[in-house]
Amino acid sequence: MDEKVKTLVTGIKDSGVEVEFGKYIKCAHCPSKLFGFFENSTGLTICQNNSKSQYITESTLVHELVHAYDFSTATLNDNNLSQRACSEVRASNLSGDCDFIREFLNFSDGFLKKFTGQKVNCVRRKASFSLSQCENLDKCETDKIVDSVFNECIANIKPFTNEQFKKF
Ligand SMILES: [Zn+2]
């Protein structure tokens, strides 16, 4: 997890953004069920009242750092839903949001295929859910937007190398 955070923070800093804990990365009380969020203008917030475990806090931090990385390196347009969907796919894929499934990967090849497929479905579902929450859109609409960018964006693991990603 440390390596994920370090790699992302380095990538964000390299794009010219100052990443200061307490300023760019901060904690706050949030409405229930919200674990964290990112705003292009102010940086990212971790919801201290809802992040009940270290695992949730860490995966939320990585999730939001992926958004911060995408916005700081690619000058994404806040209003462009495809770009936001892409960032949600990447954040779910890279943060560990869906990695509890990996725990079960060691049974057999059949299981491996099944659970690898489940991870992909989990990433798709979470990305669509996040987008619908942020944008107040219907799930059917966000499913379509996520599907239109899914293959390209799940394959984009920047700033991580393949070697790093395999270890996650
Ligand atoms: Zn997100």
Image (cartoon, helix red, strand yellow):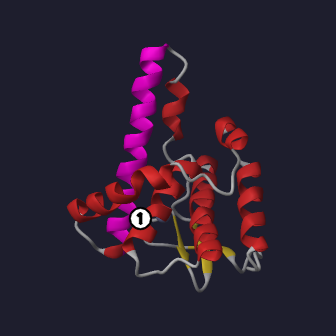
Query: Residue at the spot x=48%, y=55% of the render?
Result: 153
Q: Position of residue 59 (x, y in %)?
A: 59, 52
**To which residue does mark 1 refer?**
85
- In this image, 103 relative to 78: left or right? right
Q: Quadrant of residue 80?
A: bottom left
Amino acid type for the residue under numbered disc 1: Ala
User: How many labels, in total?
Assistant: 1
Query: Residue at the spot x=61%, y=56% of the render?
Result: 57
Task: Tell which residue pokes out farthest to the top in this image.
Answer: 108
**The C terminus is located in which quarter?**
top right
Task: Tell which residue pokes out farthest to the front in this image.
Answer: 152
Please check the rendered image and state whether residue 126 is part of the magenta-colored stretch, yes or no.
yes
Mark 1 neighbour density, 10 Å: few (under 14) some (14–19) many (20 or more): many
Q: Which residues are magenta?
A: 108-134
Please check the rendered image and state whether residue 164 is part of the magenta-colored stretch, yes or no.
no
Vertical placement of 62 versus 164: above or below? below
Query: Residue at the spot x=28%, y=57% of the render?
Result: 143
Query: Residue at the spot x=53%, y=39% of the render?
Result: 99
User: Is the CB of the residue bearing disc 1 within 8 angstroms of ligand 1?
Assistant: no
Q: Position of residue 127 (x, y in %)?
A: 40, 57
Task: Tell which residue pokes out farthest to the bottom in this image.
Answer: 41
Q: Quadrant of residue 131?
A: bottom left
